[in-house]
Amino acid sequence: MDFELTAEQKSFKSTVKSFTEKEFKPNEQILDRPEDESEEIIRRLGALKMMGIAVPVVYGGAGLDSVSYALALIEVSRWCGHIGAVMAAHSLYCFTLMASGSHEQKVEYLLPCASGEAVGCYALSEASAGSDISGIRTTAVRQGHEWVIDGKKEYVTNGGISSYCVVAAVIHDGGDGKEIRLFVLDLRATPGIRLESMNDQVDTHAFGTSGLVFEKAKVSERALLGQNDNGSGWIRSSLDMVRIGIASQSVGIGRAVLEESIKHAKTREQFGKPIGSFQAIQWKLADMATELDAAELMTLKAAWLKDNQKPFHKEAAMAKSYASDVAMRASIEGIQVFGGYDYRMKHAMERRMRDAKICQIYAGTNEIMRLLIAENLVKGT
């Protein structure tokens, strides 16, 4: 059993760490405000191939592995959970194209995003459909050599900053039967698509979450992903990969909480001594550190399984649910360490708590993750 990173993974992690400490630290609070664009930093990430880490070089990516992807997201989210969310959602778009796209679709729609020239998003959730994809009501009807898409998507991470989108829609076979299919399209060149802002959320603010309304939006027949395959399988496999990203995002957020809590515990004095000398505070820090180490190991294990072509469905769900729960617990305890000083909007720890909370919800709630884990246990997989 070898826990050592490869030389390539170490080098990439070091590059990401240097970049984030230089670019994110001075701008942490600025990036929290929805009125401030994150596009310049995203372009710089793209220049380092960090928007397509696990995408082959031929399609504009860095050609690295899933472990490197996880390591990068930990470092990015340690400084900025918002940009970590942008990367995770963008990667969901990229992973879907990698898995189900033809060579021509990858050249046209994946290459610009993996190279960092553009951002991609994934339109799945609706008012009646989230973890239960059978509730999708958006439809795609074939008319000649085109598909006509109608419906409304909600909670589209990156929707407000993306050029390209994968959208899940239902097609009917003429009877009572229906299938979910995936389509890829250019948001800015496709008539009939309307953006609805959703930046009033309590969680991460800077990643352009939006609704997308499709009103007789016409796309070419070449927009269909996976040819005649039902899209449900592609959705599940892509979500498995992005859950590794969200687990990584959670670990990074938790690491930031721990580092800030330790620093505060060393400098804040009460009763004539640093609060870090009190056992009550020491135990909080010890629990944070222990749980975060466990969460990171679970996350890297899931990524390693993916890289070695081994089943990782259960492990991705475990990593996502555990790491996000750990990040949330850490942020709550971090606020407790800081006390009344931190129970205010726009303080770093308050922002960490918002960043952590969304990780328990998107790409499948943690309740759903536990159902998936149990299902695999019962099946013996």
Image (cartoon, grey):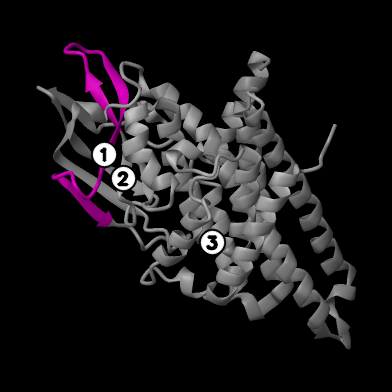
Work out whether residue 167 or residue 291 is closer to the camera in this orientation and state it. 167
Contact check, label 2 and label 3, Cβ < 8 Å = no
Q: CA distance from mark 2 to mark 3?
A: 27 Å
Secondary structure of the residue carrying tag 2 is strand
Q: Main secondary structure of the magenta part?
A: strand
- Bounds of the magenta span? 168-196
Residue 371 in the image: above or below residue 341: above
Q: Quadrant of the N terminus?
A: top right
Q: Earlier in the sequence, mark 1 or mark 2?
A: 2
Name which residue type carries label 3: Arg
Q: CA distance from mark 1 to mark 2?
A: 6 Å
Q: Earlier in the sequence, mark 1 or mark 3?
A: 1
Secondary structure of the residue carrying tag 3 is helix
Residue located beneath label 2 in the image = 164
User: Circle 1: is it few (<14), some (14-19), or many (20+) Cα within 10 Å?
Assistant: many
Residue 29 in the image: above or below residue 358: below
Contact check, label 1 and label 2, Cβ < 8 Å = yes
The residue at the far front in this view is 58
Q: Earlier in the sequence, mark 2 or mark 3?
A: 2
Mark 1 against mark 3, which lies toward the viewer?
1
Instruction: Please give the name of the residue rendered at 56% of the width and 63% of the height, measured from the top-left corner.
Output: 80
Secondary structure of the residue carrying tag 1 is strand
Q: Quadrant of the C terminus?
A: top right
The residue at the far bottom in this view is 272
The x, y position of residue 340, in whole percent, is: 66, 79
Residue 99, labelled with which disc?
none
The x, y position of residue 334, in whole percent, is: 70, 66
Residue 354, labelled with which disc?
3
Work out whether residue 263 or residue 304 is closer to the camera in this orientation and state it. 304
Residue located beneath label 1 in the image = 185
The residue at the far top in this view is 175
Residue 123 in view of the camera: no
